[in-house]
Amino acid sequence: MRARVPVPLLVPAILGLLFLILPLVGLLARTPWATLAERLTEPGVVAALRLSLLTSTVATVFCLALGVPLAWLLARVEFPGRRLVRALITVPLVLPPVVGGIALLLALGRRGLIGQWLDQTFGISLPFTTAGVVVAESFVALPFLVIAVEGALRGADSRYEEAAATLGANRWTTFTHVTLPLVAPGIAAGAVLCWARALGEFGATITFAGNYPGITQTMPLAVYQTMESGDLEGAVVLSLILLIVSVAILAGLRDRWLTAP
Amino acid sequence: MSLLDARLVAERGAFRLDIGLRIEPGETVALLGPNGAGKTTALRALAGLTPLSGGHLTLNGEDLRGTPTERRPIGVVFQDYLLFPHLSARDNVAFGPRRHGMDRKAAHAVADRWLDRVGLAEHGRRKPRQLSGGQAQRVALARALAVDPVLLLLDEPLAALDARTRLETRGELRRHLAEHPGATLIVTHDPLDALVLADRLVIVEQGRVVQEGDAATITARPRTDYVARLVGLNLYRGRGGGHTVELSGGLVLTSTDIVHGDAFVAFPPAAVALHPHRPDGSPRNTWPAVLADVQQHGDSLRVRLDGPISVAADITPAAAAQMGLTPGRELWVAVKAAETRAYPASG
């Protein structure tokens, strides 16, 4: 027999649900369905969407290349200051992205700590370029990947790695042939999370890379600018696209994240 | 010179392992002991998975102390096998040969040969989760042997199997171990595994070797309570004076063996007779005792008795019914001198 749900729990629960869903309903209700098709194919929209997909994908690859080894180091190697390193990694997670953007400018800007050297030695300048967008997105998204992958590594049985060693595998071969395949699902989940975070990135991007259509104007920036210029309908269309992409990601992760344990 | 010659010293918190170990080519040694005796630590130290804090380790004339696990000529069968779940049985077995420099084709040929030897030629494409416990055990053995190890290490190789599979697998494992030309060390807490699989037993308790020898010697002349319990003997220590051994409580046991000085006396529970009254006649070893408890033991009943010494006796259910065995009942214990064995405690 099923116990009755207490009203003091049921009412706020339903209100919370409505609070999350109503804005999305509002978005759908105001969508100009009649002109949607032609709006979607406007050159500005296509350019922003292309740029968003490109930069968030490149940022994810970049994060995988650096984040998986970093997560492995944190999960498998004892070194002094490991807890501090782990704490540092979570800083970008709680830092307002705008502050992250300013920090990036100070580090990688033309007058920045490293940026100055990059500019003088290689003639590379990151701010206000598409590469700068990738940097800003990676900065914000990397912690998501590291935390997800480290969790997966800690959950994986490290005795498989010992078994590999007894069979003659050195640490690198063990990593590529045993550890990676074992935590592949965790890495995939982390990568999708990282990609979603990069796709929605706004604050760090607009601060560090600016808002140049076709070069640094990603979808969230385009939404913001369209809205500012008074074109509510345009902003709605762009938002709808982002909404659809986000829901698609959630659907892809359904099995992993949405089925409660 | 032995193929393996080691003195393994390792510390883990307050626990200290310090055991000497020698294994000849083709010999199988069982490291037998209760849980927490340090058996697995010894195995891990031999494999290089746990660092040694002292002693020496020579395999095939080569000092292995500074050699990392992946360069030691060893094979390990882990207790729960640790077959790589993402690889097929065949790729699991081929993993070692691949790491030892074989190309994919050659490694697969080696893997197929080994799977065939353990009777799993048909199962090479299965993933570990599709294998039964006994099959997984055989794949793990094939995987460990496929690198032609000089030293084969098995950690509780049969512990994860159910009773029936265990029986079959034990016999098969024995055959494969007999064919292995290198040294083999089995770590186990199961005396039956040790007796069936090993040529020689090394008994470890609390990080030390307490006894070693072949199965016949150890079962006939246990030197610790643990070993005595394993082989099902009553064991006491005392001072020998010819045909008698005086135990610390003052009880004197008579034996047909002759022993002097620090000595053990052992006799099987089946050699213990119980009487409601003081028996007359031949048995010279008699003493009064109080029944502590009774348990079913195979076809007979195992009776535990307190008194000057604690003793286990096996009696038939008929005899038990006749005497009315309830805890607290006072009885007389008798053991024939010819059924006891007395032997020196030293050496």
Image (cartoon, rainbow, N blue to C red):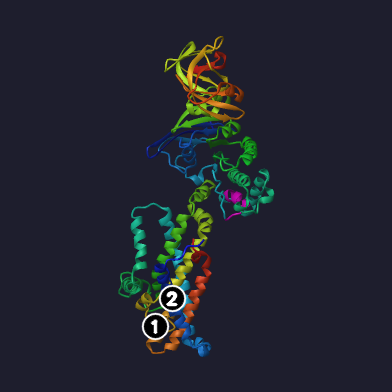
Magenta span: chief secondary structure: helix
Residue A155: x and y in percent read 47, 55
In the picture, residue B315 is in which quadrant? top right
Residue A258: x and y in percent read 49, 66
* Relative horizontal placement of residue A143, taking residue A244 as reference (left or right): left
The amino acid marked with disc number 1 is Tyr
Element type at marker 2?
helix
Can residue B3 be seen here? The reply is no
Magenta stretch bounds: B86-97
Q: Residue at x 62, y 51 (%)?
A: B89
Q: Residue at x 61, y 50 (%)?
A: B94
Of callouts 2 and 1, the N-terminal one:
2
Residue B35: x and y in percent read 48, 37
Residue A192, label in figure: none
Q: Is the residue under label 1 in contact with that under label 2 (CB below 8 Å)?
A: no
Q: Name the residue under label 2.
A: A18
Magenta span contains residue B38: no
Considering every residue shown, the one lying at the far right of the view is B122
Q: Estimate how packed mark 1 is, as few (under 14), some (14 to 19) or many (20 or more) residues with alpha carbons within 10 Å.
A: some
Magenta span contains residue B91: yes
Q: Which chain carries label 2?
A: A
Element type at marker 1?
helix
The amino acid marked with disc number 2 is Leu
Judge whether A92 appears above or below B78 on screen.
below
Q: Distance between the residues labelled 2 and 1?
A: 25 Å
Residue A224, label in figure: 1
Is the same chain shared between marks 2 and 1? Answer: yes
Which callout, 2 or 1, points to the residue nearer the camera? Answer: 2
